[in-house]
Amino acid sequence: MTLVLTSSAFHHHGEIPRLCTCDGEDRSPPLVWSGVPANAKSLALIVDDPDAPDPAAPRMVWVHWVLYNLPPGAAGLPEGVAPRDLPEGARQGVNDWKRVGYGGPCPPIGRHRYFHKLYALDTVLPDLGAPTKAKLAKAMQGHILAEVELIGTYQRGR
């Protein structure tokens, strides 16, 4: 089985709805996954934008959401998931706004791509506190069984 990640809010390479951005309600998009390997012990999700600040001259990857220790039996996350509604055991990290949780697309210029990356891990990670993407990526090294990307796009002022 192949790990699959989809959203009812946008298709792969499709436009992320305004509701899920800083121009709307900044709600996390609904996400659904399937094909989690039978030996997976946890899942991790990282959402980032490699086109920051300008897709014509990107200088950094902007991190929008960091989640880890999602249970492998969870089938997804609802739109605008509140911290109290995350699956049991799931933890959130810090985004590049220095906040824990989701921060939606808010590109200063041009159309940006937002990579929703789901990882199936062979372990439950220790409590990392509120890790950055880099700290989570380091903790996941050597534990990734499968991964998948769902890419959405957004451009402001349209």
Image (cartoon, helix red, strand yellow):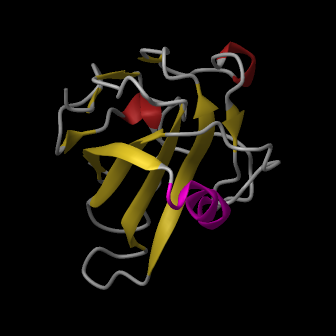
What is the total number of numbered labels drawn onto the structure image? 0
Residue 134 colored in magenta in the image: yes
Outermost residue to the front: 39
Residue 83 placement: quadrant: top right
Would residue 119 appear left or right of 81 to someone viewing this image?
left
- Predominant SS along the magenta part: helix
Nearer to us in this view, 91 or 43: 43
Q: Residue at x 36, y 68 (%)?
A: 109
Q: Identify the residue shown where x is 54% and y is 51%.
A: 64
Residue 124 in sight in this render: yes
Against 103, is 76 above or below? Answer: above
Q: Residue 6 placed where, x, y %? A: 26, 27
Relative image position of residue 89 (x, y in whole percent): 72, 24
Quadrant of the image containing the N terminus? top left
Q: Is residue 23 left or right of residue 56?
A: right
Q: Is residue 102 visible?
A: no
> Residue at 68% across / 43% down in the picture?
125
Image location (x, y in percent) of residue 115: 34, 51
Kindly identify the residue that appears in the image at 26 percent across and 60 percent down.
111
* Direction from residue 2 to residue 128 in the image, left or right: right
User: What's drawn in magenta, residue-wise?
Assistant: 133-142
136 in magenta: yes
Q: Position of residue 5 (x, y in %)?
A: 29, 31
Residue situated in front as seen by the camera: 120 or 112: 120
Side of 16 relative to 59 (left or right):
left
